[in-house]
Image: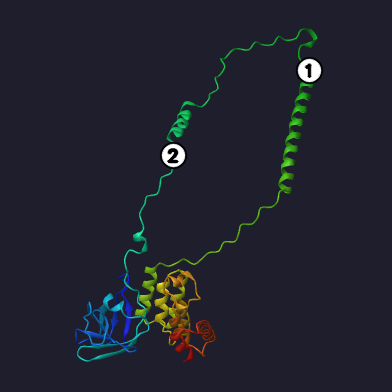
Amino acid sequence: MTIRITEDEGESGGYAFIDLGRPLRSPLLSFRRQDTEPRHLGAEGWQPEVAWLAPLAVTERDGGAVARFGPAVIDRIEELVPIEIVAQDGTSFGVVSWPYISPAPAGPGILAGLPNTPATPPHIDVKGAGDAATAREDTGPSEDVAAPDVPLAEPTPPQGKRRGLPFLALLLLACLAIGTGALILYRDALWVMVARNDAPAPAPPPPTTTEPPRLTAAELHQRFSRLVQERATPGAFIALGETALSSRQGGAAFRAFEEADPVTNADAAWQLARFYDPGNDEATYREAARPDLVRAAYYYALWRNRSSRHTDALRGLCDANAANDRLRAICRS
């Protein structure tokens, strides 16, 4: 069984679990890099002499030992460095290509050194506000005073032949008044109808686009852990990584693509290369990893001559950075 290294999500960085795949009979381990000298990791960094390091804790899983190490080991090993892990009794657990592990926090950040000056509160004219409030209090609502009930004098009826209009004349006047009022109402209603017909039709509401709900880092971690326990296929981890990208969670996306194995999965290699490609300025990628020409070229080169997009991207990096000695070795291979 190969070595399996996973980040300790319970910490903010710098801690990882190393599943050795076999029982650990010795309490001490050594980490030996295979690419350059000095090759032994010690308490103060890389050194020529072999050093034995004690894990923070050792647990058992499926008959194998899982060792937990902190920043003293995790932060000193770069990604993709081939590391051989050997127990003090001489047992070699094999060589692993070290994965990306979030480093331990370096401190409160660059904003800690800035002066903390309180913002100047806005100026409030208390006097003006008080006068306006007083004026509002003094000015009460005006009330109409009802006129006293004074009996009206009855009109004096006309004398002789002018004692009131005939009943027929009064009836005609009433009909005329009713007809005139109805005509005025009809005219006003007709104008309203004409105005409504001439008015332009209201513009249709703009189409609404619904974005898929974004997942939090905790929700993505739960899905990742469940897929690991289920031994899911690489396609499931690729789908989870794409969901993490749409949720703007670059760190979770990186871990999902890495778990899909870029050596055997072209999509995983492409996405991991995009995290390091300096030509990719998308914020989600940039927040998770710093641009690195060599690492981007490494992932592109995994599928060179087997995938046109990988081959073209690698050729573009090589042509634009021909003077880079470290990149030249990958471009020529």
User: Residue visible at 75% across and 9% down?
Assistant: 158
- Residue 124's tag is 2
User: Residue visible at 69% across and 11% down?
Assistant: 155
Is 252 left, or right, of 159 in this rendering?
left
Q: What's the CA distance linking mark 2 and mark 1?
A: 76 Å
Looking at the picture, how far across and down is residue 70, in whole percent?
Answer: 27, 75
Which mark is in front, 2 or 1? 2
Looking at the picture, how far across and down is residue 11, in whole percent?
Answer: 30, 70
Residue with the mark numbered 1: 166
Q: Nearer the viewer, residue 62 or 312?
A: 312
Q: Residues within 10 Å of mark 1 (few under 14, many from 20)?
A: few
Q: Residues within 10 Å of mark 2 (few under 14, many from 20)?
A: few
Is 328 left, or right, of 223 in this rendering?
right
Q: Earlier in the sequence, mark 2 or mark 1?
A: 2
Judge whether residue 70 can be spotted in this image: no
Query: Relative to 75, is 170 above or below?
Result: above
Amino acid at the residue labelled 1: Pro
Q: Secondary structure at mark 2?
A: loop
- Is the Cβ of the residue at disc 2 closer than 8 Å to that at disc 1? no
Judge whether residue 81 can be spotted in this image: yes
- Quarter of the figure with residue 79: bottom left
- Residue 38's tag is none
Q: Quadrant of the N terminus?
A: bottom left
Amino acid at the residue labelled 2: Ile
**Residue found at the very far top of the displayed protein:** 159
